[in-house]
């Protein structure tokens, strides 16, 4: 995912943080595959079950609005993520509990940031080639209505487009669903299902391809089947290939923004 010679090797980083040789990792860490699977399943159940804690355990009154309901879920998701991070740190046999080592294991790093953002985002964009083409054609048809006699865009049209963009940004910033789709859900899900689970599975002796398959299965059990399995595999691949949590995070936010890819259009001539 990044240029040869400067590629961030996540396995190498993980081995350095743990202090074990890669070929002896499973034997010396003391982590068995059943134990790792139980820990990952527990984090999955925690992530889902805690969402119902306010009503079932704390017996709080029903929320009076959608915003209050979502804020409760935000708090629950953040708590479950923090618990998973602590649990993962306690289970992993790290040679040092310093913040730098923990951040390295979780894929939180500052080197090769632009590669971890631009390249995965470009790769993800290929999946939306049809969507981009369709939106471009629709945008061109819309612009034709605002062309002046010289064939160019009028000042009022540009002003109108800019105002619409500002209004959209303002609306998104105050929309609780936008915060869920673009901030809280991607961040907490990637922390739990990628940053916490992948190091455990690798240290438990699972092969890379097995990890890429297992993480989305656990992810889909916590959320929904189908599309989440495909995306979970892709996000796990990005995390292992780049060593950056930022890579699957930006891909997650981008996919949430774009929705499902457009495979065909019913409009005439498209």
Image: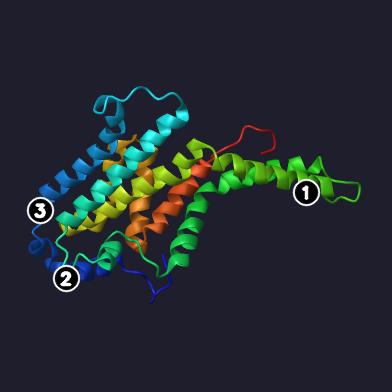
Q: Which disc, if any, is residue 105?
A: none
- What residue did someone put label 2 on? 19
**Residue 24, position in %: x, y?**
11, 67
* Residue at screen point 33% across, 36% down: 223
Could you classify mark 1 by the number of other residues whose Cα lies within 10 Å: few (under 14), some (14-19), or many (20 or more)?
few
Looking at the rendered image, the disc whose residue lies closer to the viewer, 1 or 3, is 1
Where in the figure is residue 167, as x and y percent of width and height?
A: 66, 41
Which element carries disc 2, helix, strand or loop? loop
Mark closest to the chain's N terminus, 1 or 2: 2
Viewer-proximal residue, 9 or 131? 9
Within the image, what quadrant is residue 63 found in?
top left
Residue found 41% across the figure and 44% down from its top? 184
As measured in the structure, the alpha-carbon distance from the residue carrying label 1 to the one carrying label 2 is 58 Å
Please, what secondary structure does the residue beneath circle 3 have?
loop
Quadrant where the C terminus lies?
top right
Residue appearing at x 33%, y 44% in the figure: 78
Question: Closest to the observer: 215 or 168?
Answer: 168
Q: Which mark is residue 158?
A: 1
Q: Position of residue 264 (x, y in %)?
A: 57, 37
Question: Which secondary structure, mark 1?
Answer: helix
Is 241 located above or below residue 171 in the figure?
below
């Amino acid at each position: 995912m990044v240029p040869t010679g400067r590629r961030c090797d996540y396995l190498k980083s993980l081995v350095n943080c743990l202090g074990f040789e890669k070929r002896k990792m499973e034997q010396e860490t003391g982590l068995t595959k059943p134990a790792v699977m139980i820990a990952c399943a527990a984090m999955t159940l925690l992530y889902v079950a805690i969402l119902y804690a306010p009503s079932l355990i704390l017996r709080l009154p029903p929320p009076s609005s959608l915003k209050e309901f979502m804020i409760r879920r935000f708090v629950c998701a953040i708590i479950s993520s923090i618990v998973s991070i602590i649990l993962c740190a306690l289970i992993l046999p790290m040679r040092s509990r310093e913040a730098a080592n923990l951040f390295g294991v979780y894929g939180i790093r500052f080197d090769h940031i632009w590669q971890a953002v631009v390249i995965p985002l470009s790769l993800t964009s290929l999946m939306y080639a049809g969507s981009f083409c369709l939106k471009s054609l629709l945008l061109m048809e819309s612009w034709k209505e605002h062309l002046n006699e010289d064939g160019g865009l009028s000042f009022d049209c540009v002003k109108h487009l800019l105002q619409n963009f500002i209004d959209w940004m303002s609306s998104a910033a105050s929309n609780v669903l936008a915060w869920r789709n673009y901030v809280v859900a991607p961040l907490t899900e990637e922390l739990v299902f990628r940053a916490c689970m992948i190091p455990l599975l690798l240290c438990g002796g699972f092969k890379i391809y097995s990890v890429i398959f297992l993480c989305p299965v656990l992810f889909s059990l916590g959320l929904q089947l189908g599309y989440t399995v495909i995306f979970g595999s892709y996000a796990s691949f990005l995390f292992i290939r780049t060593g950056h949590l930022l890579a699957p995070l930006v891909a997650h936010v981008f996919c949430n923004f774009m929705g499902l890819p457009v495979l065909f259009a019913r409009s005439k001539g498209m």
